[in-house]
Each structure stands twice: as structure tokens, then as C-alpha cells.
Image: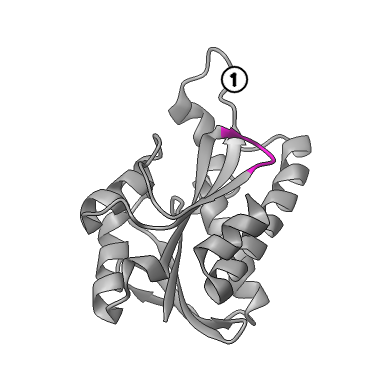
Amino acid sequence: MKLLVGLGNPGHAYRDTRHNVGFEALDLLATRAGSPARKQRFQGEVAQASIRGVPVLLLWPLTWMNLSGSSVLAARDFYKIPDSDMIVICDDFNLPLDTIRLRPGGSAGGQNGLADVLARLGTTTIPRLRLGIGPVPTGWKAADFVLGKFSKAERERVGVVIERAADAAEEWAALGIQAAMNAYN
């Protein structure tokens, strides 16, 4: 089984914010997989599904973005999923809006939810799929920017980015990180 984690903040107030594109990408993957039933587990919501014949666990941590690692750790340990069979999908304000980037590991790059996941799991070798939401406008604080909502014009572009991210996540699940990087970076 592979574990796909979408990062975001719980609650209606955070719906459609820049910080929640990880949740949105996972929502699309769940829809494509036939909208499997979600259960409350591991301080989040989980759904078991199949992507291109590969069994997957979709995880939406509900611990708040900056504390996502406890939810991911609990799911990983319960199912004994190797780090290479996990992917974290999150926003990245350092990437332009129309960009996605897959990596097999590395630093959190300023993404606090990803930083908590890496710290709790004790490794930087977790594959990640970053969705560009940037850049942060001059004079804005990064926290205010990521918790803000997209403009109407940006929202249209984000829909395309989320579709591409879901495609990349499916490629990762079926063929691995290198094949997905070759196809989508």
C-alpha cells in the first residue's frame, strides 16, 4: 500500500485558501478513485482506494498544517509503509502559481507542515509534490499570503495545477518517483 498525504488546514474558514491546495489535490484523487468512504483515524481523515491498480491510503491530516507530522507518523507506522512509498502533497509559495515540482527528498523549503512531517518521521527522504502558489507579493507576510484566498483569475489557474498534480500523483503511485519526475517536472 502507498500513502498519499495532502496537507492543509481543517475547517470551513480555510477552504479554498492557498495553504489548502494539498487537500484539494487529494480530494480530486479521491473523486477519480470513485470517492471512497472517509473515516476518522490518525488525527485525520483517511480513505482506502486504488490508483491504476495500486492500493493506496489517502490521508488528510486534521491537526492543523504545522502539526501534520503526528497524523502522518501514526498512519505510516500503523500500516508499516516504507518512506519511499509515501508522498506529501503541499503548497509552496517559492514556486510560481502554474508550477508543480516532485522531489524524492530534501529540505522542507519553508513549508511548515512538511517540516513537521520530516521532523516527526526523522528523515528528509520523503517524496513530495509541491504545488506553486507564489510568489508572495511585496509587502505581504508569508503567513497572511498562504492563508488568503485566490483571486478569481488565480482560481481558474489553480484548477489546472491541481489537475496536473493529481496526474503526477497517479504517475508516482503507479510507476514511482523517477518516472513521475521525468513526466511532470
Quarter location, residue 27: bottom right
Which residue is located at x 56 percent, y 41 percent? 18
Label 1: state its secondary structure.
Answer: loop
* Horizontal side of residue 175 vs 85, given as left or right: right
Point out the image quarter for the N terminus: bottom left
Residue wearing tag 1 = 137
Range of the magenta residues?
95-99
Q: How packed is label 1: few (under 14 Cα within 10 Å), some, or many (20 or more)?
A: few
Question: Secondary structure of the magenta portion, mostly?
Answer: loop
Q: Is residue 152 above or below residue 79?
A: above
**Looking at the image, which residue is at 62% across and 79% down?**
33
Residue 110 x/y as whole percent = 39, 34
Report the residue that reaches farthest toward the bottom: 53
Please indicate whether residue 59 sits to the left or right of residue 54 in the image. Answer: left
Is 138 situated above or below 156?
above
Question: Residue 41: image x %, image y %?
Answer: 33, 74
Q: How is the rendered protein coloured?
A: one colour
Magenta stretch holds residue 84: no
The x, y position of residue 47, in whole percent, is 47, 78
Identify the amino acid type marked 1.
Pro
